[in-house]
Amino acid sequence: MTHLVQATYDGSALQLDEPLPIEPNTRVLVSVHPNGTEKEPDAPSTGVSAFDIALSMKLDGPPDWSERVDHYLYGIDDGK
């Protein structure tokens, strides 16, 4: 679960502009990107992997593709 919120650093602590929807005393990992000095953070992940996308494409290929990938990609003779 990822949450993106704006905050202000007051010299000793970050003050969030809005509350987070997490339980009190939950440990979190914080990544700080000062506004205007760095690119905007990437959009949160949709949870869809490249593997999920490949499976949804219903691709057809040789049954030994994973074992002979160099042969199929680069034409390397692997003796099979």
Image (spheres, rainbow, N blue to C red):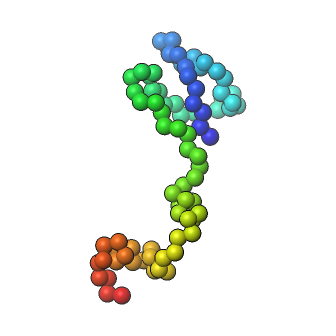
At horizontal 48% and vertical 37% (from top left) the residue drawn is: 42
- Judged left or right of residue 17, residue 9 is left
- Judged left or right of residue 60, residue 69 is left
Q: How many marks?
A: 0
At horizontal 39% and vertical 23% (from top left) the residue drawn is: 37
- Judged left or right of residue 53, residue 75 is left
At horizontal 52% and vertical 70% (from top left) the residue drawn is: 59
Locate residue 46, reporting x and y percent: 59, 46
- In which quadrant will I find the N terminus? top right
- The quarter of the displayed image where residue 34 is located: top left
In the image, residue 64 sits, relative to residue 3, either above or below, namely below
Q: Which residue appears farthest toward the bottom when viewing the image?
A: 80
- In which quadrant will I find the C terminus? bottom left
In the image, residue 67 sits, relative to residue 9, either above or below, namely below
Locate residue 40, reporting x and y percent: 46, 30
In the image, residue 27 sits, relative to residue 76, either above or below, namely above
Locate residue 65, reporting x and y percent: 44, 76
Instruction: Give the camera-side residue of 11 and 16.
Output: 16
- The quarter of the displayed image where residue 44 is located: top right
Instruction: Give the camera-side residue of 14 and 47.
Output: 47
Instruction: Give the camera-side residue of 48 and 9.
Output: 48
